[in-house]
Image (spheres, rainbow, N blue to C red):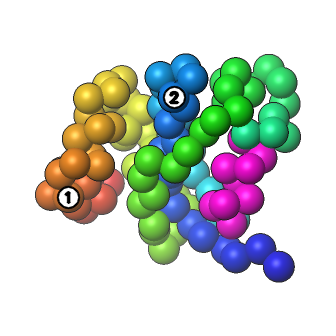
Amino acid sequence: MLKKMTGCYILFSKKLQKFYVGVTQNDLTERIVKHNNQSYGKHRFTAKADDWELLLYIPTHEYLKATRIEKKIKSMKSAKYIRNLKLYPELLAQLVSST
């Protein structure tokens, strides 16, 4: 049985040197496996690589909160911002509290 996990997640592909930001209400491990084996379709962004690894997971109690966090991260359009979320817990806390 899959464990329900609501939150925003950030994946990183070494092959592409790119990040992917998404949200889930399901088992995160299974979600990453599906990204890596192109279960979401060969035309999707994550289908370009098969080495996606979890960089950061931001748990939330509500799916809507997770989508607001996802949109905020994407709106920054910055790999440096994403790396800083991982490096600086206070930046991550500020993101969560402001969305």
* Residue at disc 2, secondary structure: loop
Which label belongs to residue 89? 1
At x 77%, y 47%, the residue is 34
Residue 48: image x %, image y %?
Answer: 70, 21
Q: Is residue 78 magenta?
A: no
Secondary structure at badge 1 equals helix
Crowding around mark 2 (Cα neighbors within 10 Å: few <14, some 14 to 19, many 20+) is: few
Q: Position of residue 64 (x, y in %)?
A: 52, 58
Q: Write down the residue under mark 2.
A: 14
- Where, by quadrant of the figure, is residue 94 drawn? bottom left
Residue 22, numbered label: none
Q: Amino acid at mark 1?
A: Pro
Does any portion of residue 67 appear in the rendered image?
no
The magenta stretch spans which residues? 27-35
| Mark pair 2, 1: CA separation | 23 Å
Residue 30: % across, % down: 73, 59
Q: Is residue 28 within the magenta segment?
A: yes
Residue 42 visible in the picture = yes
**Residue at 42 percent of width and 52 percent of height:** 56
Q: Nearer the viewer, residue 51 or 68?
A: 51
The percent coordinates of residue 73 (x first, y second) are 37, 38
